[in-house]
Amino acid sequence: MKIAVLDKETLGDVDLSPLYAVGETVVYPLTAPHEIADRIADADVVVVNKIRLNETNLSASPLKLICVAATGYDNIDTAYCASRGIALCNVPGYSTHSVAQLTLAMVLSLATHLREYSDYVASGEYTASGVANRLTPVYHELSSMTWGVVGGGGIGSQVAKVAEAMGCHVLMCRRTPDDRYEQVSIDDLCRRADVITLHVPLNDSTRGMISRERIATMKPNAILVNVARGAVTDEAALADAVEEGRLGGVGVDVYSQEPFPAESPFTRLLGRKNVCLTPHMAWGSHEARNRCVREIGENIRVFFANGTRNRIV
């Protein structure tokens, strides 16, 4: 069995021994679109993280299995894979704690104005002031806030637990009810929540769900954090709301184009104290990445033993 790993660099310093243990593994740091077809020409299995696979690069491939080093698989043309008999496996649940941790870190930083306070000390202003403390900008306890969780899968549920532990009243918008939290529509959540965090996959029903119209209904001091997929928000509308002072803070780890280009609306927000932009790293704790590779190795082993572990197609 031959395994081709096409974008190892996006996984960082991860241990690939679980892949070496199940087959001959060829590792490429990165793969440009025009290189994909050649690199999978003699592979039985391909492992990808961010690379898009579709008819253009799969049509002549002998692949039996695509393994996505992620939970989401919107970069794979699942209909084409099904038509060709190419199996697809993902890795559910591996990054739950990692993503929840960054979500909380962003919310805490933005709600507490941590950057402003830290900059005040780092600039020397604190030392020069002669005053023992500074209490502006004013911040509020999370326990006084309502936290809206959009998407109640593994990550959303973990974030809801964290929010509840911080003393927040939790609203949840999800397809199936969860009796632990108040269930609301997306429109109700946008109107009522002080903190809104996004944890949904990208599909036809979620694309653009945080629209310009819904952003306009949010509280002017609301904090919005997107650790889902960039395209679930109207990115231009989000940037406009920040520039116009209609949102209290924004944290974003995911973008409709990654890395976001110079002409992205987010470029206008660089350096703002109430904005936290990170490079799609929420999923990538050391533990989560190694867990992901171990799961991929097991997916491959089970597939060739005629099992259906984590099968999407």
Image (tube, grey):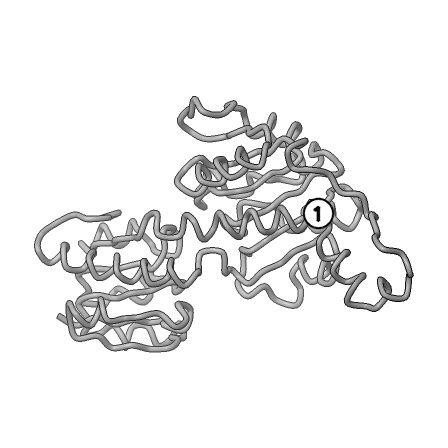
Task: Tell me if 88 is positioned left or right of 35 in this view.
Answer: left
**Which residue is pictured at 39% across the width and 56% down the height?**
75
Residue 185 location (% of width, % of height): 54, 25
266 lies above or below 163: below
Residue 162 location (% of width, % of height): 51, 39
Q: Quadrant of the N terminus?
A: bottom left
Judging by the rendered image, the residue that carries numbered circle 1 is: 112
**Which residue is pictured at 62% across the width and 58% down the height?**
277
**Which residue is pictured at 30% across the width and 70% down the height?**
15
Residue 273 location (% of width, % of height): 75, 56
The foreground one among 255 and 310 is: 310
Counting other residues with Cα less than 10 Å from the Cα at mark 1, is it few (<14), some (14-19), or many (20 or more)? some
Residue kind at label 1, given as amino acid type: Thr
Residue 217 sits in which quadrant? top right
Q: Secondary structure at mark 1?
A: helix
Residue 188 location (% of width, % of height): 61, 25
**Which residue is pictured at 21% across the width and 54% down the height?**
87
Residue 122 sits in which quadrant? bottom right
164 lies above or below 109: above
The foreground one among 73 and 34 is: 73
- Count of labels shown? 1
Task: Tell me if 102 is positioned left or right of 52 in this view.
Answer: right
Task: Tell me if 190 is positioned left or right of 198 in this view.
Answer: right
The foreground one among 17 and 5 is: 17
